[in-house]
Image (cartoon, rainbow, N blue to C red):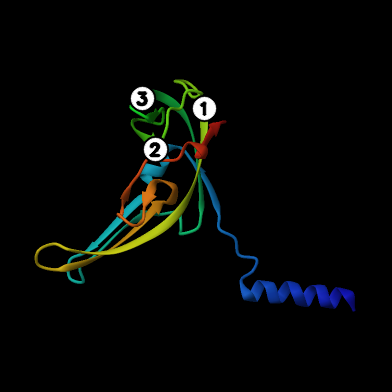
Amino acid sequence: MRKVVVLAIFLIAIFAGCTEKEKAVVMNLKELSEDVETETNNETHYFFSGFKSLDDGDTLIIEDEIYQKQIVQNYTLLLFASMPSSGFYFDGNLTDFNVGDKVRIKLHIGVDHLQQFDGQNVWTIEWEVLKEGWDFEKHSWKPLPTNVIQHA
């Protein structure tokens, strides 16, 4: 009888969606860049920018090596070995991280929706973004908080 009850609870959880989990994906910065996709529909005035293998709620772990470090005022720009011309700004001075360090950056995927007038038409825009690096009120990028990065 106990097995039947456990099985029934398990089946209810599956059908209710309780066992669905967001996925965690590990990639370097170049792989993330190659995962970006966009779609523009000029007839319906719709623009989408997102990721091929990531969805809203997913966890993204970027594993890469610091290629270059620049500190500007109270921000740190880290460029990465997998794509030396690209990187992230961090909100603070990352004194514990240096060129050659292998790091892990844990981020989450979110979706921002907005409408924008281009002078003739109202466009619906949908962005899949890195939640920690996105200002949902201003619909724009912001530096990542320092607590998302750690040594690998």
What residue would you read off at disc 1?
Answer: 102
Which dot, 2 or 3, sits closer to the camera? Answer: 3
Determine which quarter of the picture holds residue 137: bottom left
Q: Nearer the viewer, mark 1 or mark 2?
A: 1
Q: Is residue 35 visible?
A: no
Disc number at residue 30? Answer: 2
Q: Residues within 10 Å of mark 3 (few under 14, many from 20)?
A: some
Extreme residue in the front direction: 74
Of all residues, the one furthest to the left in this rendering is 120
Please provide percent x and percent y for residue 21.
59, 60
Camera sees residue 23: yes
Dot 3: element: strand
Could you say which is closer to the camera, residue 72 or residue 18? 72
Q: Is residue 126 above or below residue 5?
A: above
Residue 26 placement (x, y as % from top left): 52, 43
The residue at 64%/69% (across/down) is: 18
- Locate residue 11, reporting x and y percent: 71, 75
Q: Quadrant of the N terminus?
A: bottom right
Judge whether 80 appears above or below 55 on screen: above
For label 1, the SS is strand
Closer-to-camera residue (60/139): 139
Q: Amino acid at mark 3?
A: Ile
- Number of disc labels: 3
User: Is disc 2 in contact with disc 3, using a CB cutoff of under 8 Å?
Assistant: no
Residue 93 in percent (x, y) is at 43, 27
Q: Which residue is mark 3?
A: 71
- Amino acid type at mark 1: Lys
